[in-house]
Amino acid sequence: MISSRERARHCVVAALGLALSLGSTVLFAQDAGVWPARTIQIVVPYTPGTGADILSRILGPKLAERWKIGVVTDNRAGASGNIGTDFVAKSAPDGYTLLCTATSFGTNPAINQKLPFDPVKSFAPVILLATSTMAVIVTQGLSAKSMREFLELARGQPGKLYYSSPGNGGPQHLAMELLKLDARIDLVHVPYKGSGGALADLVGGHVQAMIVSLQTAAPYVQSGKLRMLAVMSAERSQAFSDVPTLRELGLADLEVETWYGVFAPAGTPQAVIARVNAEMNALL
């Protein structure tokens, strides 16, 4: 029987494998005809302020300037990204509706066997935009000022500390469950319908901890609203060089990153996909 720890690791590995397939996709330019001729909708299946949302809002105006048409970001959050993802899966494959998503796109199928879409058959990969390490963040009111102190606090109060996530089965949820297993701590999971509520309650002190991407954590940490205790990468982040890695704390197996990519509905003309790929690559 596969243990809960192995199952969680398989979910993360599946997500990273999908990211690699995105990165290795080779697209060849063809005649894209008159596309684009009207506004393009980039659906982000998460709340505003998340990594995918930030990337979409950075790229959108630049693409609009290059293409001389409107490019709008449409946040359709909920169900760990499945609501917005399903919307794109059922959209016309004409290049005017794109999905800017993250790791939950790859982990959700491993958690939910009854998705309303097929993550492989319902989509065509366009581009891998970026990858990011994950970070452990806590509310400022918590007595623990370091990761070591946090682990000691959690071990001394099993089942008394709470952590939030954007939803069940997402990378943030799975990463924290891996940390719980490896560090032998007992935290209570509080799932939300997106990162917005999860982060708001963390800032308010209603929950004590959370794991998010470095990009999502950065503005909260830099403004002093939250405290970053550790990063889940092999090396320290240049942006937060004073924050240790979990490897430094003896948790060598805990290296988790998230990825961000763009997909189109299956059946979208290859010429359109090639052009979006080329234009986004030029902007990155």
Image (spheres, rainbow, N blue to C red):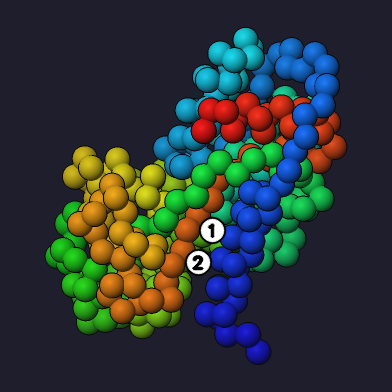
Q: Residue at x 32, y 54 (%)?
A: 237
Q: Residue at x 51, y 44 (%)?
A: 130
Q: Which residue is mark 2?
A: 174
Q: Position of residue 256 (x, y in %)?
A: 46, 63
Q: Is residue 169 left or right of residue 22?
A: left
When asked about the image quadrant of residue 15, the answer is: bottom right
Vertical order, 80 against 50 (above or below): below
Tag 2 secondary structure: helix
Q: How many residues crowd around disc 2 within 10 Å: few (fewer than 14), some, or many (20 or more)?
A: many
Vertical order, 36 against 146 (above or below): above
Q: Position of residue 193 (x, y in %)?
A: 50, 49
Q: Is residue 238 left or right of residue 134?
A: left
Q: Which amino acid is tagged 1?
A: Gly
Q: Residue at x 34, y 62 (%)?
A: 235
Q: Nearer the viewer, residue 185 or 94?
A: 94
Tag 1 secondary structure: loop
Q: Which amino acid is tagged 2?
A: Leu
When asked about the image quadrant of residue 21, the answer is: bottom right
Cα distance, mark 1 to mark 2?
6 Å
Q: Which numbered dot is residue 170?
A: 1
Q: Position of residue 65 (x, y in %)?
A: 56, 13
Vertical order, 137 against 22 (above or below): below
Q: Position of residue 215 (x, y in %)?
A: 39, 45
Q: Nearer the viewer, residue 17 or 145?
A: 17
Q: Is residue 209 left or right of residue 196?
A: left
Count every numbered label the image shows and give the total. 2
Is label 1 in contact with label 2 (beta carbons under 8 Å)? yes
